[in-house]
Image: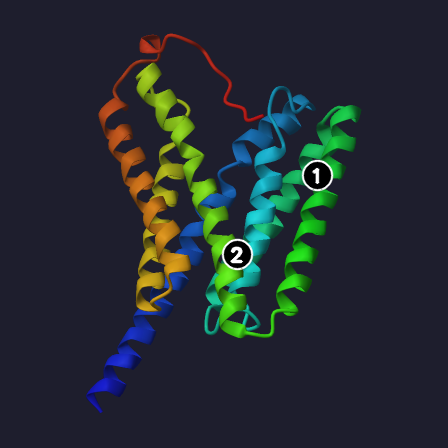
Amino acid sequence: MVSLASSQVLAICKDAAGIAGNIFAFGLFLSPMPTFMRIMRNQSTEQFSGLPYIYGLLNCLICAWYGTPLVSPDNLLVTSVNSVGAVFQLAYIVLYVTYTEKEKKFRMFGWILTVFGLFVIIVLGSLFILDLELRRIIIGSLSCASLISMFASPLLIINLVIRTRSVEFMPFCLSLSTFLMSASFLLYGIFSSDPFIYVPNGIGTLLGVTQLLLFAHYRNSSREDSAEGLIVSYS
């Protein structure tokens, strides 16, 4: 009876953490909105790159596939948050293609086809693996590596903040959302004893804490302290 009760409490805590992660993830999904409002206002993508959204789409698709019952049991909250994320990334890609130059349009179409082609290969290839545990390990490793590389991207911003002594290019809401979402899924992964979830989100939590600490330290620095006026873009 005690074991059953503790299992039920663990399941409730896991679900609560997963639901919280889904809610906090919207902060991350909405964070590119100012960039795209600027793009729509100027009718140009300027120096912004569409590759982060391409990579974000692939990451969301892989993680969503990992959360399905065909790969891992009882992880539908992982699928739900990444499915919503994939829709957001696809919407941003469509907007980017709409306002970018003709040459970049063809390049973006090529990347989109590559992403969906890779995803189809991953899905079909994993379905040929009849050992369900081996399938979970392989797809889990892919999703874990993808998440870690994605969480590592804020290191560029952290370096920029330290170098310029300004948080101008590190919005507080984005840093807070990163921390809250990562911490929620860190707990979700711990409660479900899933290293493919708690390892990358543990790294994301540490990076989120680092960004919040930097924000607290540099928030009063004036823009004049920054040595250069920069437009943040990724290539």
Q: Which residue is mark 2?
A: 63
Which residue is pictured at 53% across the width and 36% down the height? 32
The residue carrying pointer 2 sits among few (fewer than 14), some (14 to 19) or many (20 or more) residues within 10 Å by Cα, namely many
Which colour scheme appears in the figure? rainbow
Residue at the far bottom in the pictured view = 1
The quadrant where residue 197 appears: bottom left
Q: Which residue is mark 1?
A: 111
Of helix, strand and loop, which one carries label 1?
Answer: helix
Q: Position of residue 19 (x, y in %)?
A: 40, 63
Q: Position of residue 190 (x, y in %)?
A: 31, 63
The quadrant in which the N terminus is found is: bottom left
Of helix, strand and loop, which one carries label 2?
Answer: helix
- Upstream in the sequence, badge 2 or badge 1? 2
For this view, does 92 lie left or right of residue 102? Answer: left
Which residue is pictured at 34% across the width and 45% down the height? 203
Q: 138 or 33, which is in the foreground?
A: 138
Q: Amino acid at mark 1?
A: Trp
Query: Can residue 181 be seen by looking at this rendering?
Result: no
Question: Vertically, is 127 above or below 200?
Answer: below
For this view, does 71 lie left or right of residue 113? Answer: left
The quadrant where residue 195 appears: bottom left
Give the alpha-carbon distance from disc 2 to disc 1, as whole Å: 19 Å
Q: How many marks?
A: 2
Which residue is pictured at 51% across the width and 65% down the height? 67
Question: Vertically, is 32 above or below 47?
Answer: below
**In the drawing, what numbered circle is on residue 90?**
none
Q: Amino acid at mark 2?
A: Cys
Question: Vertically, is 234 above or below 5?
Answer: above
Q: Position of residue 143 (x, y in %)?
A: 50, 54
